Image (tube, rainbow, N blue to C red):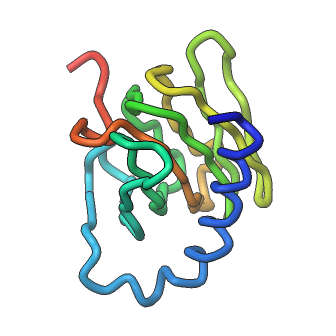
Amino acid sequence: MSKSILLSLAIAFFVSTVHAQDSAVGMSKGKGVLGQGQQRTVLSKTDLATAPGMEAIVLTVDGAPGLIGKKHYHPGDEFIYVTEGSLTLDVAGKGKVTLKKGETLHIPGRVVHQAINPSPAAPFKVVTFGIFKKGQPDTTIVGE
């Protein structure tokens, strides 16, 4: 699947799910998966008919001021869109990248990264879209 198709899918999911967040009652909440001060809320998890063995996952991540998250990776490509605040991601092989509201970043599968909130006062909120191998954990913590 080409990056342009993946990005188009990511944008479509972002647009359709950012507003659906308030109606995500009953969806799984993964609190503390990446450490204290982060809350993950799964909005959608869907098998991909055009890519057997793969699934799309859309979720939000809320990060507390001054957060330093755990290093982790995902079993497939992840697209991150900042909806509030700013977020620094320390990405293996790339270094630190700071994203502000409205900016996006693509992280290839199995690339270790870590979320850091550079603000000591303001939280951040992101929407992430991932295309992951089905049946694998969506997030694997590194170094534990």
Task: Name above or below for residue 94 compared with residue 53.
Answer: above
Quarter assignment of residue 59: bottom left
Where is residue 51? Give x, y as percent: 46, 43
Where is residue 84? Give x, y as percent: 67, 65
Quarter assignment of residue 72: top left
**Position of 54 compared to 2: left or right?**
left
Task: Name above or below for residue 137 compared with residue 112.
Answer: below
Please state the total of marks drawn on the protein image: 0
Outermost residue to the bottom: 23
Where is residue 11? Give x, y as percent: 70, 60
- In-front residue for pair 9/129: 9
Q: Residue at position x 29%, y 42% from top?
A: 134
- In-front residue for pair 94/65: 94
Q: Residue at position x 24%, y 36% from top?
A: 136
Where is residue 104? Give x, y as percent: 74, 47
In the picture, the quarter occupied by the N terminus is top right
Quarter assignment of residue 43: bottom left
In the picture, the quarter occupied by the C terminus is top left
Q: Residue at position x 31%, y 86% from top?
A: 25
